[in-house]
Amino acid sequence: MRDPRVTMALLLPGLLLAGCATGSGSTDPGSGGGAPPGAPTTSAPPDTSTGLPGPSDGGAAGTRPSGALSPTGLPARLTVTVDRTGDGDTRTWSLTCDPPGGDHPDPAWACVAIEQAGGASAFDPVPRDTACTQIYGGPQTAHVEGTVDGTPVDADFSRNNGCEINRWNALQPVLGDTAAM
């Protein structure tokens, strides 16, 4: 019979990696972190001209909440720059919340995502001592700067490991749907 300490030592790394890969921030296991937690899904196609989810009456497949959005009024003024291919060809949008506006393709949905991801803290970098799965999610990068609820944000996003993919997915309505990229 195997010593229980040996069994735990063998199982613990796998459990830790599984938790990191699934994105512990999502309360909706079916969302994969792509939609705000608990958001219903639709099957409307993404807006391929912008790389972001479709307009307010449609959306990206499997991610856009249907029905009325109800932002609580978290003020934000952001500039979002996304490089969809990693080749330096960027697109930039302005996004304001309370009320939702700017030239972002879907400001209301983006504002709800910021609120549900935790406000300004959603833009914090992954702590250096965090163990992340070494999984590559694609060449996309993004930079977001401005303020959320009076707190300055200046954040870089990528998809180069499990932690960064989870960060991207939490703010996917702000940064863009990688399926459309």
Image (cartoon, rainbow, N blue to C red):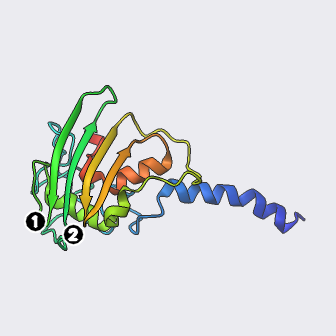
Which disc is residue 99 wearing?
1
State if disc 1 and disc 2 touch (CB < 8 Å): no
User: Is 130 in front, or is 45?
Assistant: 130
Question: Image height check: is 106 above or below 52?
Answer: below
Q: Which residue is mark 2?
A: 74
Q: Position of residue 27 (x, y in %)?
A: 40, 69
Q: Residue furthest right?
A: 1
Amino acid tagged 1: Pro
Q: Position of residue 142 (x, y in %)?
A: 31, 41
Q: Is residue 136 left or right of residue 99?
A: right
The N terminus - image quarter: bottom right
Q: Position of residue 133 (x, y in %)?
A: 56, 47
Where disc 1 sits, the SS reads loop
For disc 2, the neighbor class at 10 Å (few under 14, some 14 to 19, many from 20) is some
In which quadrant of the rendered view does residue 97 lie? bottom left
Task: Answer yes or no: is residue 10 visible.
Answer: yes
The C terminus - image quarter: top left
